[in-house]
Image: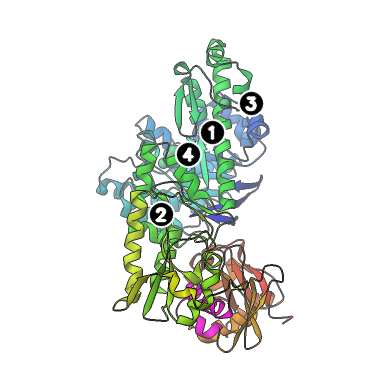
Amino acid sequence: LSFEVKDRAAAGRIGRLETRHGTVTTPTLLPVINPNLPTVPPADMKRLFGAEMVITNSYILRKSDALRERALREGVHKTIGWDGPVMTDSGTFQSYFYKKPIEVSPLEIVEFQKKIGVDVGTILDVFTTPEKTREEAVAELDETMRRAKEAVAAKNGMMLAATVQGGVHVDVREQAARAIGALDVDVVPIGGVVPLMEQARYADLARVILASKRHLPSGKPVHLFGAGHPLVFPLAAALGCDLFDSASYAKFAKDGRMILPNGTRSLDEVEELGCICPECDRWKNAAELRRAAPAERESALARHNLHVSFGEIRRIRQAIRDGALWELVEERAAQNPALLDALVALRGENEVTWLERLEPTSGARAFQYRGAHSMHRPGIRRLHNRLVERWRPRSKTCIVLPERPKPYAEGYAAYLDAFMRTGHDFVVDTPMGPIPLELERLYPVAQSVFPETLDADARLVREAYSARFFHHFDGCDVLPADLAEYEALAPELCSLTPDAFEQRRMASLADYQYGPGAAAGLLAGQVTFKRSPGTGGVRNVFADGVHVASLRARDGLLSLRIEGARRLVAALPSPRARIRLDDEPASFVRDGKNVMAKFVVAADSQLRPGDDAAVVDSKDAVVGVGRCQLSGWEMPQFQRGIGAKNTEHAKDD
Ligand code: GUN
Ligand code: ZN
């Protein structure tokens, strides 16, 4: 298998899919090439739009004598005029669309794809429509599975796509995903979803994608079959779809329609083109394009549609790199009510739990509030759950501080020393709810942008969390801060955050990141700091004189030093805070090499992309520190790529 993940955000990823005709960066869009009448020449697909891979139809190629002969003689690449990676579909869609079985056997169509040299061939799955009952969906899935197994046995070097079907029945989708995921297939499409997209049933679409993804191995690239409108790309990418295919650009152009990131418009309805793509730039206004010759108009619309579609793909990739994919999804949902329903479908306990398991620890950019869904993001759920489950009060008195400009500890700098001497707990009342003052720099608390006025939904989420958080102080006092009380104790502004506060910060951080017992292990002994000469902020954390951790300025989290990793391993039962390797791959890590995902024997299922973990050998000896690129639980599901980057290794230590 030749798929690896390079970067992540939400449940989405930047991947590299390797084929015999080149490597593709995902998420990407495969424009559909109609071998009979290409609206846009394949050569332009690469040059003008940046297409990296195309999809065409082996059933259509096989049906025409001329195309079949040529494809068999010269191969599919020459036949369609594209020398990059080619995927082919199988005729499933035609048999759905024309409501009759196609006149080729499932095995014959796989053999044909192999003979014409496609890079990724597709099985002839049974297209299960949304109207099908559960029993019908199960029966059709049985047939799809029979064909999938037959195709796997015949694939012989060709990369194979085997489709997850199951209609809208979540448990049948799950069963399909488990069964397909267990086969030796290279790409997993999610099929049968075209009617859902045509009817704008995006909540059902989201449920179907999630049910499938939840039970597929993370290491397989997932294709959303027939997803050609950019409207669904951000949501589908955020749920972990890697490949899309589009005939929409051509179909809409034929109907005189313009694709826009949030919908479509008929050219007849508009006076302004309202688009800045190079194609629209050629025309003064809509009327001028309407007056163009039909073939020229269709071609112009198809090109515009491709510009908009690939523009959205590039936006998604950058949003993944920025850690801002939820922002993009919410922006699009704000422009389309049916997409908003899809976001609501992602708020269930099961859904958020799965999304949280993939959500990176922090993003390159601040958490940006976008609307009523923002507080439902999995990163907020994690923050809330960890502060309820992992944070420990040190006193029986909680003082609630009003919000001040961030970072909060700076806003309260004059009081910190006095606060610490009271022995009380201090929390700040933030838009995300009560946050212990010492955790104020943690992503996304400090790195967030909220409006002054929160929407009702966000307030509900905050209230619900707040009630859970204050259980920490059941039977204790929770009091609003009377700062005058501390004035006497805090006569002067401290230029340095006091050590007592930093010690509290490190202890709370260690437990927040690695769970109960972590602080006691990592920070046992006398805790001291090395501070930045410029800002006075803590850089390095020492326990009994040993450098155990550093404070990351970017996200306010602890990064582990190797001695810190050793202390965690000694304090926490396996597999907590660990990535375990066999001894041979472990010896490479000891020498400074990265942790390759395929060598991971076991890893703490709580580790998230961005977390530091102790890398251990079979005897639980620490050989290095790895910064996770993948969640711990999914590492063993990858055959390619880096599971964790080596940040510290035992050899020179
Ligand atoms: N194209 C659009 N939907 C589907 C599907 O479910 N299966 C296949 N093979 N192709 C499709
Ligand atoms: Zn345009």
* Residue 32: mark in rendering: 1
The relative height of residue 452 versus residue 47 in the rendered view (above or below) is: below
3 or 1: mark nearer the eye? 3
Which quadrant of the frame does ligand 1 lie within? Answer: top left
Residue 124 drawn in magenta: no
Q: Which residues are magenta?
A: 498-523
Name the residue rendered at 49%, 47% in the picture. Answer: 327
Counting residues from the start of the chain, the first of labels 3 and 2 encountered is: 3
Counting residues from the start of the chain, the first of labels 4 and 2 encountered is: 4
Q: What residue did someone put label 4 on?
A: 90
Does any atom of ligand 1 lie closer than 8 Å to the CB of label 4? Answer: yes
The quarter of the picture where the C terminus appears is bottom right
Instruction: Residue 245: tell me if it is visible.
Output: yes
Counting residues from the start of the chain, the first of labels 4 and 3 encountered is: 4
Label 4 and label 2: CA atoms lie apart by: 42 Å
Residue 479 x, y percent position in the rendering: 35, 71
Relative horizontal placement of residue 551, taking residue 214 as reference (left or right):
right
Q: What residue did someone put label 3 on?
A: 278
* Residue 375: mark in rendering: 2
Label 1 and label 2: CA atoms lie apart by: 38 Å
Q: Secondary structure at mark 3?
A: loop
Label 1 and label 4: CA atoms lie apart by: 13 Å
Q: Secondary structure at mark 4?
A: loop
Relative horizontal placement of residue 358, taking residue 20 as reference (left or right):
left
Label 3 and label 2: CA atoms lie apart by: 38 Å
Does any atom of ligand 2 lie closer than 8 Å to the CB of label 3? Answer: yes
- Give the amino acid type for the residue marked by disc 2 in the picture: Met
Counting residues from the start of the chain, the first of labels 3 and 1 encountered is: 1
- Give the amino acid type for the residue marked by disc 4 in the picture: Ser
